[in-house]
């Protein structure tokens, strides 16, 4: 029991001693910490005092610097103000001087104005005196001359007007002659240049087509029993078949190239097929007609492609293809139309006109010839109606209507198409004509001139392209010569059919003859 009490006492004493030791240790730590804090406070206080001194010093330096700058700026401003005051004073002095000068000038101007007023009054007085003197002199002159001022002025003006009229008429006549010569020269150069730039081959169309046979026995098969095959061929094609002694050949004769071509294709198909009898002939003929229509469209499209023309109705393209099988005086109508289109395009390019439109008008100018055997009317009228039907341009329609002079040309392109048509038709070798027709035409041409009153003799020269009319100078004067030329021209256009153009030249000359003996 005692041991336990003793142990408890010892534990309590140990706890007490430990608590006291911890208290003492904490006190020591607190004292050390307090000393450190005091030392740290002192240190920071010293640093704060140092910073304060440094800040005060910097502030004083900055204040001194700012003070110096302010004093410097103040001095500069004062100097600027002083300079401005000096400049203002100088300007005031200058303004004062200018004001004084202006006042002096105003005074001078007033003096001059007063002097001018006085001088003007003097001049007016003198002018009035001169007018009075002039009027007195005019009265005396009118009295002496016996004419009033108005009458004299009218006579002088009339004389001047007569003189000026003569000079103006002479000037206009000279300029007209010069302009005519220059225009004639330029037009000839343009036409020659155009013809040189476009030089197509010329080939006359024939009225017969030769079909080659594989052998002479084929002639009998084509004729058929009692001639039924050849009769059927001629009936359905409208072409004459000429079978003679020519070996391995049959001649198709017709003035319609379109029918001849259909007959040729039909006959060649029958020869290749070998079956030749009336029903087969009609069957092949119908098939050939359909193929021919497609061929016409291809021919028309090729012509459009060659000329660079686009957007045309298919029916009109087919009609253009038919021109391939139409002729005029032996000249192929499609080749003639393409040639006219090219020539019109070249001329339009020279004059700055629409080249594409000129080519279109040139190609379609003879479109009526493709179907003039199917519809009543002239090819001009038919062609114009076709162009209207398919919505062609008004310029194209007018070119068709006016290319033979049936209507007046309303555009430059219409005139160019007529010129190109004449060039194409009048090229040497372009059109064929028999000797009898040629001589007949020349005779009729000369007869028209001989029938005119006052004409002595008429000569057709240049293959009928020029008619020279010699008049009697004692009966016909210069003015009547112009009248005769126009009457002959009109009569030729009304009564004759001719390719190209005919130039009418009326010659009036006076010959004086003396015989020396």
Image (spheres, grey):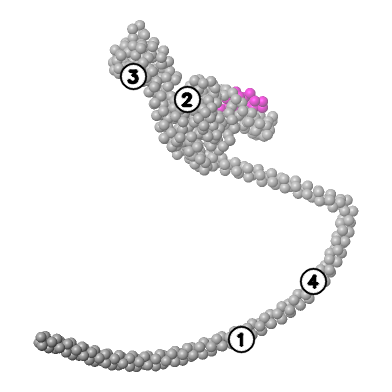
Does the magenta-highlighted stretch encompass residue 393?
Answer: no
* Disc number for residue 268: 3
Crowding at mark 1 (Cα within 10 Å: few <14, some 14-19, many 20+): few
Which of labels 1 and 2 is toward the front?
A: 1
Q: What's the residue at 36%, 11% (across, down)?
A: 278
Crowding at dot 4, Cα within 10 Å, few <14 / some 14-19 / many 20+, comes out as: few
Residue at 45% x, 19% y: name it. Answer: 255
The disc, 2 or 3, on the residue closer to the chain's N-terminal end is: 3
Q: Which mark is residue 263?
A: none
* Residue at x 37% of width, y 14% of height: 282
Q: Mark 4 touching mark 3, by CB under 8 A?
A: no
Of callouts 4 and 3, which one flags the residue occurring earlier in the amino acid sequence?
A: 4
The C terminus sits in image quarter: top right
Residue furthest to the front in view is 1
Nearest to N terminus: mark 4 or mark 2? 4
Asked if disc 2 and disc 3 are in contact, CB closer than 8 Å, the reply is: no
Work out whether residue 132 can be spotted. yes
**Pointer 4 residue:** 116
Read off the residue under disc 1: 86
Disc number lying in front (1 or 3): 1
Residue 277: % across, % down: 33, 11
Dot 1 or dot 2: first in sequence order is 1
Q: Which residue is mark 2?
A: 370
Q: Nearer the viewer, residue 336 or 272?
A: 272
Residue 434 at x, y percent in the picture: 48, 21
Q: Is disc 1 in contact with disc 3, using a CB cutoff of under 8 Å? A: no
Front residue of this view, candidates 54 and 317: 54
Reading the chain from its start, which is encountered first: label 1 or label 3?
A: 1
Secondary-structure class at tag 4: helix
165 horizontally vs 321: left or right: right
């Amino acid at each position: 029991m005692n041991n336990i009490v003793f142990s408890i006492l010892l534990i309590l004493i140990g706890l007490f001693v430990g608590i006291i030791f911890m208290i003492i240790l904490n006190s020591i730590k607190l004292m050390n910490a307090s000393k450190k804090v005091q030392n740290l406070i002192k240190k920071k206080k010293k640093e704060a005092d140092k910073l304060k001194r440094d800040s005060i010093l910097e502030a004083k330096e900055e204040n001194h610097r700012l003070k110096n700058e302010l004093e410097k700026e103040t001095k500069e401003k004062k100097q600027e103000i002083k300079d401005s005051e000096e400049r203002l004073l100088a300007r005031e002095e200058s303004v004062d001087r200018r004001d004084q000068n202006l006042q002096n000038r105003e005074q001078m101007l007033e003096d001059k104005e007063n002097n001018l007023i006085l001088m003007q009054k003097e001049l007016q007085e003198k002018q009035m005196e001169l007018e009075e003197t002039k009027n007195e002199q005019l009265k005396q002159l009118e009295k002496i001359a016996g004419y009033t001022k108005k009458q004299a002025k009218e006579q002088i003006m009339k004389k001047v007007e007569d003189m000026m009229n003569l000079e103006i008429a002479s000037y206009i006549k000279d300029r007209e002659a010069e302009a005519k010569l220059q225009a004639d020269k330029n037009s000839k150069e343009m036409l020659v240049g155009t013809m040189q730039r476009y030089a197509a081959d010329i080939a006359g169309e024939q009225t017969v087509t030769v079909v080659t046979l594989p052998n002479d026995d084929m002639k009998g098969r084509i004729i058929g029993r009692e001639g039924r095959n050849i009769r059927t061929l001629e009936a359905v094609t409208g072409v004459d078949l000429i079978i003679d002694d020519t070996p391995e050949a049959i001649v198709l004769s017709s003035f319609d190239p379109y029918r001849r071509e259909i007959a040729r294709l039909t006959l060649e198909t029958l020869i290749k097929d070998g079956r030749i009898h009336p029903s087969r002939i009609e069957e092949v003929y119908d098939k050939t007609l359909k193929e021919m229509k497609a061929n016409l469209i291809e021919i028309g499209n090729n012509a459009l492609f060659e000329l660079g023309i686009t957007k045309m109705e298919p029916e009109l393209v087919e009609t253009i293809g038919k021109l391939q099988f139409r002729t005029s005086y032996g000249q192929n109508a499609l080749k003639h139309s393409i040639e006219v289109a090219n020539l019109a395009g070249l001329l339009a390019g020279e004059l700055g006109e629409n080249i594409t439109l000129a080519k279109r008008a040139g190609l379609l100018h003879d479109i009526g010839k493709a179907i003039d055997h199917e519809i009543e009317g002239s090819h001009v009228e038919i062609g114009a109606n076709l162009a209207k039907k398919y919505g062609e341009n008004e310029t194209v329609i007018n070119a068709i209507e006016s290319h033979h002079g049936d209507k007046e040309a309303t555009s430059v392109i219409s005139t160019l198409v007529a010129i190109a048509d004449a060039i194409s038709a009048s090229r040497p070798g372009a059109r064929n004509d028999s000797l009898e027709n040629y001589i007949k035409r020349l005779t009729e041409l000369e007869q028209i001139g001989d029938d005119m009153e006052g004409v002595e003799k008429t000569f057709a020269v240049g293959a009928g392209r020029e008619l020279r009319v010699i008049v009697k100078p004692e009966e016909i004067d210069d003015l009547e010569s112009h009248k005769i030329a126009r009457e002959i021209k009109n009569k030729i256009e009304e009564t004759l059919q001719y390719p190209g153009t005919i130039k009418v030249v009326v010659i009036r000359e006076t010959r004086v003859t003396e015989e020396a003996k």
